[in-house]
Amino acid sequence: MSAATPIRLLIADDHLVLRYGLKTFIEQQPDMQVVGEASNGAEARERFRALRPDVTLLDLRMTGFDGVEAIEAIRKDDPEARIIVLTIHKGDEAVYQAIRAGARGYLLKDVPFEDLMAAIRVVHAGGQCLPEEIARKMAERIRHDELTPREIAVLKLAAGGLSNKQIADRLQLAENTIKHYVVFALAKLGAQDRTHAVSLAIERGIIHIEDVDPQSTRRRPNER
C-alpha cells in the first residue's frame, strides 16, 4: 500500500473525543486516510453508503441503532464490507454477535495504537483480526447454547430484582412458564441460581446494566 493509494477509513463512535483522537493518530500514517465519521449506527450506515470506505471502525454500544445492527445493515448493502469493532465490551456474547453479524475484527479500546494500525492493514488486505483473548471468548461462547429472546427478557427483569410472579405479570405469562424460562436459562449458562445467571449474562454481554429495569429494587437472589 503506497501513500498514493491510502486505506480509506470511516470511524463510527458516539464519543467525539475518541473519534478525534483516532482520526489524529490514523492520519499520521502515510498509508491511511479518515474519509468520514459517524456518531451512531444509523449515521454509520448512511456514511458508509455515501463514502464506501475500505475499512470501518465501529463501536458496539451507540445510541439508537446499535453496533451489531449497523454491521448487519452495512453488510446487507455490501457483503464485502470490512468492519473492525473497537469497543470496551469484552463479553463472549458481544464478540459472538459482532462476528456473526460480519465483523472482520474485534478489538478493545485499550488496544496499543500499533496493534490497531496493524489490524486495519490486515483487515484491509482481506484477513481477520481476533486477538488471542477475544478468540478464546469466541470459542467459549460457541460452546454455549444460545438463549432465546424470551429467556433474555426474563433475565433482564430478574436482574432488576423482580420475582417470578412479578416477571409473569410484567410479561403477561403464567408464573410456571417463567419458572421454566429461568430453569432453561440456568442450564444454558451453567449457573447455580438466578443471581449467578444474571452475573454470567452481564459478564458475557448478553444483558447490560443499562438495560435493567430501574423501577424494580426488590431482590430474591436464590429463587428458582
Image (cartoon, rainbow, N blue to C red):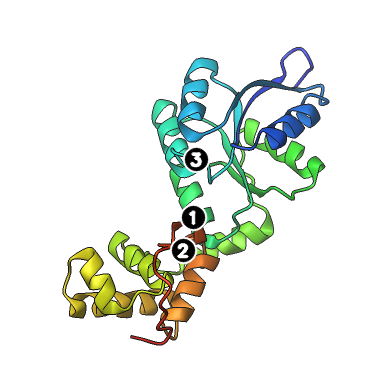
Q: Residue at x 47, y 22 (%)?
A: 46
**Badge 3 is on which residue?**
63
Point out the image quarter for the N terminus. top right
Toward the top, the furthest residue is 4
Residue 89 sits above or below residue 189 on the image: above
Query: SS of the residue at dot 3?
Result: loop
Q: Position of residue 129 (x, y in %)?
A: 64, 45
Mark 1 or mark 2, which is nearer the start of the sequence? 1
**Badge 1 is on which residue?**
96
Residue 55 can be seen in this image: yes
Q: Position of residue 92 (x, y in %)?
A: 53, 61
Q: Which mark is residue 142?
A: 2
Tell me the kind of residue under disc 1: Tyr
Tell me the kind of residue under disc 2: Ile
Residue 56 sits above or below residue 163 on the image: above
Tell me the kind of residue under disc 3: Thr
Residue 145 sits above or below residue 105 on the image: below
Q: Position of residue 135 (x, y in %)?
A: 60, 58
**Discs 3, 1 touching: Cβ within 8 Å:** no
Q: Quadrant of residue 164?
A: bottom left
Is label 2 or label 1 in front? 1
Rounded to the nearest whole Å, what is the CA distance between mark 3 and mark 1?
21 Å
Mark 2 or mark 3, which is nearer the start of the sequence? 3
Point out the image quarter for the C terminus. bottom left
Residue 200 sits above or below residue 211 on the image: below
